């Protein structure tokens, strides 16, 4: 055969046709000779013993010496069958026996990807509908001619074939473009591809522009003229299936959650799936570092285990650890960001202009960045710096439990539904359920803010208090999460806080998360008189994994302080004051007092963010905002025991809080003021105004929407 369109060899699509095929949301197939191996009417004619007469008519139509309408009428008069004959014909020629090789699998693949498949042919519904049923194509997606029947007046049954319905669009030569136009009128498809066999099909598409691209199929009835004229000519349906886009997946980050999430992703990309949307191999950016004298990335590629950040869990064999960030993203279509949030700005800056155009991202990161003009969530940062869409995946997703394949749920918050659906396919497993949520900001705010509340829950545990107190913190935390999210982003939905990303994640993190764990140890260390910094405890307990809550608390407090919202957000404010050493941990049960205590600042670097331009995030030692080396650490107040005591004394004096409130619960109990004194959270600690009493000791009166604790 001669070379195809634009001199390309057969089977080589033009760039345009390949791209349109890959993004088509509807594909229309011609029927006879395209999805079947024969003209079905010819087969019926053979069945009825008139094959040669009917074939001769088809030849005249191809030669242009007889009109389609006249030939079809003549064929039916030769065939002259009854409905019973058709039934027998269909039994002896079941759909599977009539289909062209590879077409069934191609259609199933398209359908699994959500592509709408249509059949438009100049054959007959009576013979085409069984094929459609076999292929899972609904009747209303089939355009074909209708036979006319003679009816028996007495039995009311069809008896003899008496022609066909000329009102059907497919009864005429220009019928196919008309059918496609009807499809487009009814459904706003973006891109429609047409797969057909002959020049009539090609002209039908070119003349009407009904479809965006014509692909010639010559596997059954090869045609040189079509091969020359078509932008893409295939002789096997498998070529079309193979050419469908497959997405290359990259994970940016290699910590605990990144590794647990990579297991789901690699399980899905490796598993056989009709849609076959993803390339099996997944790459993971592993920051260049040595662990136990060896390159961590190299160890991961050899042992399929992240021995530093996620020891004890096997990662997919189809996961490839790569140390070059640029290399990982350069050809990736789907980017999964999963890093401690403080490193994301540096990563985004490094990747500017390096991401594949049209790529889509999802962030699993829980945290935000605070800029003078306001907060910037990670998904917003990705959109802004990388100029690509970014969904978020948020939920009660403690990494180790997911790696053990225990049931868990998450939401994908999205702006672009198509991307969200693709990511859902990439992550969803029998043990990992995903709901799509059109509130990405709400979902991300939940994931970010719950890390602060988890610190409070850890303090409750560290103080040795029970579930009632923790539930109070969780309830108050949820309320402040919602109020702050809505105050900053009024479009956030209330319902989001009741989803897996809201109350679900909050409960899980307050029960078993790292923020809770470290805050509990920090509180105990304080009570035992051997205080330790959060950073030291993080390093000791988490062994390289990172806390997000302490940094987020500082960032969020910058927002609260700037707007003088301390009394609107008493839990957030009190937690921030406790972790910075301005209040003792026991104030977690007395947040109405905690948020009103006047905080005295002794050194410039000890201040909570006060100014309209919050201080750089790098201020807190190893919590720099990029992967570049952090500036020399300034010891924050929460790390300095002596300074803490000084400020604490001043804070207590200014709040007129009884010093008993600052003691360990045991000591407070001894004075009848501890949790077992019957006053509990409502007023058990010190002489500061009781929690839940609604009568703060001093400071502005809370607004009605204020916290109830
Ligand atoms: N671990 C968990 O159970 C869950 C974590 N998340 C969130 O996922 C995000 C990532 O957490 P994990 O994967 O657990 O990470 P992780 O807490 O295990 O931290 C280790 C990661 O930080 C990276 N890292 C350390 N220093 C760095 C630097 N200077 N520059 C760049 N990267 C550096 C390491 O290379 C490694 O990828 C966080 O926002 C976290 O809140 C969300 C759900 C569950
Ligand atoms: O986000 C988490 C669970 O969904 C994990 O929280 P921690 O970082 O506190 O472990």
Image (cartoon, rainbow, N blue to C red):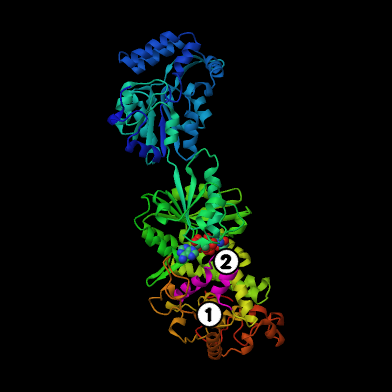
- Residue count near mark 2 (Cα–Cα under 10 Å), binned few <14, some 14–19, many ≥20: few
Please give the label number shown on residue 638.
1
Q: Earlier in the sequence, mark 2 or mark 1?
A: 2
| Quadrant in the rendering for residue 505 | bottom right
Q: Which residues are magenta?
A: 532-560
Measured as percent of width and height from the top left, residue 669 is found at 70, 84
Magenta residue check for 408: no
Please give the label number shown on residue 459.
none
Residue occupying image coordinates x 32% and y 14%? 66
Q: Which quadrant of the figure shows ligand 2?
A: bottom right
| Quadrant in the rendering for residue 271 | top right
Measured as percent of width and height from the top left, residue 587 is found at 59, 81
Q: What residue is shown with label 2?
A: 543
- Residue count near mark 1 (Cα–Cα under 10 Å), binned few <14, some 14–19, many ≥20: many
Residue occupying image coordinates x 41% and y 66%? 628
Of residue 118 and residue 163, the one placed in the foreground of this image is 118
């Amino acid at each position: 055969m001669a070379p195809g369109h634009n001199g390309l060899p057969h089977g080589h699509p033009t760039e345009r046709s390949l791209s349109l095929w890959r993004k088509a949301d509807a594909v229309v197939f011609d029927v006879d000779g395209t999805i079947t191996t024969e003209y079905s009417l010819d087969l019926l004619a053979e069945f009825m013993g008139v094959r040669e007469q009917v074939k001769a008519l088809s030849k005249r139509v191809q030669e242009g010496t007889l009109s389609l309408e006249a030939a079809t009428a003549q064929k039916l008069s030769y065939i002259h069958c009854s409905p019973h004959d058709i039934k027998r014909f269909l039994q002896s020629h079941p759909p599977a026996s009539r289909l062209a090789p590879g077409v069934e699998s191609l259609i199933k693949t398209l359908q699994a990807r959500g592509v709408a498949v249509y059949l438009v042919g100049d054959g007959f519904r009576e013979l085409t509908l069984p094929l459609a049923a076999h292929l899972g194509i609904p009747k209303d997606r089939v355009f074909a001619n209708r036979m006319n029947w003679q009816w028996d007046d007495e039995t009311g049954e069809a008896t003899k074939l008496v022609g066909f319905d000329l009102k059907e669009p497919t009864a005429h030569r220009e019928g196919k473009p008309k059918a496609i136009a009807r499809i487009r009128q009814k459904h706003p498809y973006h891109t429609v591809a047409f797969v057909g066999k002959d020049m009539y099909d090609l002209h039908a598409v070119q003349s009407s522009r009904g479809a965006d691209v014509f692909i010639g199929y010559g596997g059954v009835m090869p045609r040189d003229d079509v091969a020359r004229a078509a932008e893409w000519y295939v002789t096997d349906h498998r070529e079309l299936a193979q050419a469908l886009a497959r997405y290359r997946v990259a994970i940016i980050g290699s910590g605990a959650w990144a590794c647990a999430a990579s297991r789901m992703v690699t399980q899905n990309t490796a598993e056989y799936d009709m849609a076959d949307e993803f390339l099996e191999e997944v790459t993971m950016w592993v920051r260049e570092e040595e662990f136990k004298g060896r390159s961590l990335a190299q160890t991961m590629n050899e042992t399929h285990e992240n021995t530093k950040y996620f020891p004890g869990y096997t990662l997919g064999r189809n996961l490839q650890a790569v140390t070059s960030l640029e290399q990982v993203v350069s050809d990736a279509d789907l980017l999964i960001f999963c890093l401690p949030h403080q490193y994301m700005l540096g990563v985004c800056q490094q990747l500017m202009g390096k991401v594949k155009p049209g790529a889509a991202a999802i962030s699993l990161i829980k945290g935000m960045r605070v800029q003078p003009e306001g907060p910037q969530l990670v998904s917003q940062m990705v959109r802004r710096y990388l100029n690509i869409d970014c969904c978020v995946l948020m939920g009660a997703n403690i990494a180790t439990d997911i790696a053990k394949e225990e049931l868990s749920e998450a939401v994908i918050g999205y702006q672009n539904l198509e991307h969200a659906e693709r990511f859902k396919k990439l992550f969803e497993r029998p043990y990992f359920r995903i709901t799509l949520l059109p509130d990405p900001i709400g979902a991300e705010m939940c994931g970010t803010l719950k890390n602060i509340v988890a610190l409070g829950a850890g303090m409750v545990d560290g103080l040795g208090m029970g579930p009632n107190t923790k539930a109070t913190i969780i309830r108050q935390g949820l309320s402040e999460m919602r109020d702050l999210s809505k105050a900053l982003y009024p479009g956030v939905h209330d319902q989001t806080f009741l989803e897996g990303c809201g109350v679900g994640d909050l409960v899980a993190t307050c029960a078993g998360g790292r923020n809770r764990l470290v805050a509990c140890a920090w509180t105990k260390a304080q009570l035992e008189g051997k205080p330790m910094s959060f950073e030291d405890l993080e390093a000791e307990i988490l062994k390289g994994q990172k806390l997000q809550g302490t940094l987020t608390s500082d960032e969020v407090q910058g927002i609260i302080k700037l707007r003088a919202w301390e009394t609107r957000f008493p839990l957030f404010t009190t937690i921030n004051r406790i972790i910075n050493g301005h209040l003792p941990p026991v104030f977690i049960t007395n947040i109405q007092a905690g948020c009103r205590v006047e905080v005295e600042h002794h050194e410039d670097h000890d201040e909570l963010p006060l100014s309209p331009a919050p201080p750089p995030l790098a201020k807190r030692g190893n919590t720099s905002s990029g992967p570049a080396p952090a500036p020399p650490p300034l010891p924050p107040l929460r790390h300095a025991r002596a300074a803490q005591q000084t400020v604490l004394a001043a804070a207590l004096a200014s709040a007129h809080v009884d010093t008993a409130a600052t003691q360990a619960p045991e000591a407070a109990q001894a004075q009848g003021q501890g949790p077992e004194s019957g006053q509990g959270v409502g007023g058990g600690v010190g002489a500061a105004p009781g929690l839940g009493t609604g009568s703060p000791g001093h400071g502005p009166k809370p607004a009605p929407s204020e916290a109830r604790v």
